[in-house]
Amino acid sequence: MIEFENPMLAVDVVTVRFRDNHLQLALGHRLFEPNKGELALAGVLMRAGETVADAACRAVTSKLGIDGNHIRHIKYGKVFDTPTRDSRGPTISLGCIAVIEPDANGTATWVGFEEIPKLPFDHNVIVDQIKAWMLESIWMDPPLLAALLGDPFPTTAMVALDSDLAGEPPTPSNIHRKLGAVGFLTSTQRPPIGRGRPQTWWRARAGE
Amino acid sequence: MIEFENPMLAVDVVTVRFRDNHLQLALGHRLFEPNKGELALAGVLMRAGETVADAACRAVTSKLGIDGNHIRHIKYGKVFDTPTRDSRGPTISLGCIAVIEPDANGTATWVGFEEIPKLPFDHNVIVDQIKAWMLESIWMDPPLLAALLGDPFPTTAMVALDSDLAGEPPTPSNIHRKLGAVGFLTSTQRPPIGRGRPQTWWRARAGE
DNA sequence: ACAAAAGTGTTGAACGTACACCCATGT
DNA sequence: ACATGGGTGTACGTTCAACACTTTTGT
């Protein structure tokens, strides 16, 4: 028989918004020990009978001061074994993504994905994994994509998003091709803005 | 503000053993409604303050009659939104893998992965996803691999395992090559058994 | 020597990436 | 007409699956 320690269940939220053509992450100052005062992901311990989404929402609201109405989308599905954050013992945490309206600030500190500071616990690991997960998901998850970039969105936005998540700029032409191959998107016409050739806009196909 | 229902947290365990050169899945008859009497995955509702691994162990022990001493390894890391199984509301479940000693039976019904029956709730989805997850993990997760096939193990065993997980037989020669490319394995010599050219055996490299 | 079992060499298709070139718009 | 921003065509490299062929053993 294997022996186990006795952790509790937490929800840690990677709270993001897409603004000024960049993906940004919301961090909050910890109000309690350990690591009081440091910047960290929004996280709460799950209460009995509470939804994961509920808990994520509570984390965003209470730790980042962001109104619940400004949460566009919540996605979860990652589990982390996190090193002890609570004196009562180790913690299992569910990693979530929360997408926020571009102009909602709350009391959070917003940072770009290229300038993420050192975070307490294993929050840097969580951010890295969730980042990789988002990079896959934006090509497969219509609601997530729509929450991030809006609907419709231009090719450029996807280029910027992919760039921020991958950490290096992709070849824009390939992004356009890849978008064309995504089943749930259709290209749209839009009145051009600015100079140069107008961009293609992409809309979620009806029935998805 | 997004609205949420109010689920509880469960652990559903894909309990497996590798025996007679095949991967087998343990199912148990449900003792309570809903779907009383049907074959299903071992699953329990998580108790407050309990480990995921603890709960998985409890599920295997209580639902399949398998002694905890026969659990070789537990792996978790998948989250599922499961349709209502409990009258009290929807459930979130953590999908786990439990690897059991080859000769431990318990009170479970053991089935091959090619003959998995229709299961209640979304258990078929869970099995499919965990199956795909295992197919990736066996090439990257030394403890899981060792728990399944032992240490050392012959190429043939990996061929059979890959075959059961992928649903179709791989080209054995490519499996051998792929094993050679895995960083944490080294090839070993072993006294040949049976006819034909003796197989290569693979052992976890020291320090992994 | 032959059959059986396992591994090696080689090929070909698929995919992702990069880059040069062409197109559409504003000034 | 030219500069600017975007998209198309195409070539390269890597990865993976398939299959013929060789090697090693038992009888």
Image: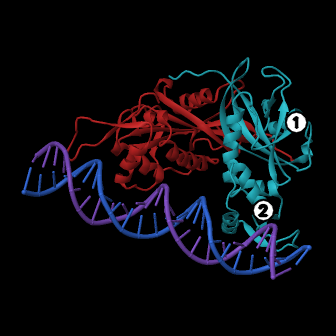
Chain colours: A red, B cyan, C purple, D blue
* Residue B64, numbered label: 1
**Residue at 45% in and 39% down:** A183
Q: Residues within 10 Å of mark 1 (few under 14, many from 20)?
A: many
Measured as percent of width and height from the top left, residue A149 is found at 40, 37
- State the image quarter where residue B161 is shown: bottom right
In front here: B79 or B169? Answer: B169
Q: Find numbered disc 2 in the image and state the secondary structure of the residue it sits on.
A: helix
Q: Are marks 2 and 1 in contact (CB under 8 Å)?
A: no
Q: Among all residues in the image, which is located at the extreme top?
A: B87
Discs 2/1, front? 2
Position of residue B168 relative to residue B175, above or below, is: above
Q: Position of residue B48 (x, y in %)?
A: 78, 30
Q: Is residue B5 left or right of residue A144?
A: right
- Where residue A91 appears, as percent x and y from the top left, is 72, 41
SS category of the residue bearing label 1: helix
Q: Of the numbered discs in the image, which one, if any, rests on residue B156? A: 2
Which chain is indicated by disc 2?
Answer: B
> Looking at the rendered structure, which numbered label has been put on residue B167?
none
Is B56 on the left or on the right of A29, as rendered? right
Q: Callout 1, which amino acid?
A: Leu
Quadrant of the rendered structure where residue A43 is? Answer: top right
Sequence-wise, the earlier of marks 2 and 1 is 1
